[in-house]
Structure formats: C-alpha cells, structure tokens
Amino acid sequence: MSTPNKDIEKVEVRVKWDPSTAGEPANDLDIIAATYGTDAPYGSPAYLVHFDSRSPDGTITLNRDSRTGQGFGFDEVMTLELDRLSDAYARVVVGVAIQQRDGHKTFGQIEHTAVQIREGYTNLAEDDFSTVAAATAAVVAEFVRDSSGAWGFRGTVRGFDGDPDSFATVMGSRSDR
C-alpha cells in the first residue's frame, strides 16, 4: 500500500464497514487525523481532527460520520486540503480507530472493512485491514512536507491495540522512514 506520489494537494480518506448483527453493540469506526508541526514532526500532535473536533483553519474536515456502518458506500469520509495547510505543519498522520465502549472489538471481528485514500479520481491506496485483524486501531496514511513545500504520501497500515484516546496520542510517534 505504498506509492511515491509527491505534491499531493487535496485527498479524501474513506472508510466503510458492515453494521453489527442484530442484538450486538454497534460497530463504530472513526477516522482520526493528527497534525504535527515543523518543530516536532514526530512529537506530540499540534492538533487532532475527529468526529468531535475539527482543524482550526478548516483544512481538515470530517465530511461524513457514522456510528453504525449502516448505509451504502463509505460510512466515514475525511478531506485533507494539504495545499492550504500552513507552512507551520510538516506532517499529517491519519488513522482509523474502533470505538471500544461496549467491549474489546478488533478489525477482524467487523465484516467488510475497507479504507480508501484518493486524490481526485486517483486511488492512492486501498486496504481491508486484514493484515491488522487483531488490532483495534491502525495508521493508514502519512503525509510529509519536503523542503520544497510539496507534500508526499506514504501509505502504510500499522496496527495498534488500545482505545481511541491512547491511539490518538501515539499514532504519529512511529515512522516507516
């Protein structure tokens, strides 16, 4: 799930999954984006964007949010306008976390999961989370600004086991450089 694409301007991260079976707690997956400053690209995030927050400048927005996975197509969609992001930011890491409020649930326990990362009509990456079936969250994309100011894309799926809050604090601390 890797591509050498550079000069990425505007991308969509899209996630879908099947609803839980009748009588079971809802399957709720959430897209989370962490933005890192040029002074600490692998430190703590400058800010997070998820279902309950947005970027201060409007460059990263959650366009669609689902708590159940019901409906057709992609259930959650986040848009990242990297070309509008301030020069103060050098890195954006995007992940997907499963809400754990009703017990421990992994990607392998949720039917038909998928993530797709697109720039316009071009698929930069797609994955079904099968390589991280035992995980409760996963990093799915990393966007890094180079010295010329162009954004590059690294598509990777790295699993994590824990709740969404703990995932959000560490999701950008590792790198596949």
Image: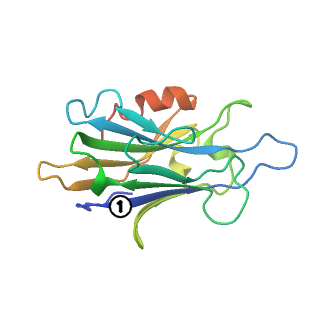
In the rendered view, does 50 fall on the left or right side of 124?
Answer: right
Q: How is the image coloured?
A: rainbow
The residue positioned 73% from the left and 57% from the top of the image is 70
| Observer able to see residue 90 | yes
Quadrant hosting residue 105: top right
Residue 71 appears at what percent x and percent y? 72, 62
Quadrant hosting residue 27: top right
- In this view, the residue in front, 23 or 149, is 149
Residue 76 appears at what percent x and percent y? 58, 54
Q: Secondary structure at mark 1?
A: strand
Q: Pointer 1: residues within 10 angstroms few (<14), some, or many (20+)? A: some
The residue positioned 63% from the left and 65% from the top of the image is 73
Position of residue 72 relative to residue 151, above or below, is below
Q: In this view, which residue lies farthest toward the right?
A: 23
In the rendered view, does 112 fall on the left or right side of 51?
Answer: right
The residue positioned 74% from the left and 31% from the top of the image is 102
Residue 119 appears at what percent x and percent y? 38, 66
- In this view, the residue in front, 114 or 51, is 51
Under mark 1, the amino acid is Lys
- In which quadrant will I find the C terminus? top left
The residue positioned 61% from the left and 54% from the top of the image is 113
- In this view, the residue in front, 134 or 17, is 17
| Observer able to see residue 153 | no
- In which quadrant will I find the N terminus? bottom left
- Which residue is label 1 attached to? 10
In the rendered view, does 73 fall on the left or right side of 150?
Answer: right
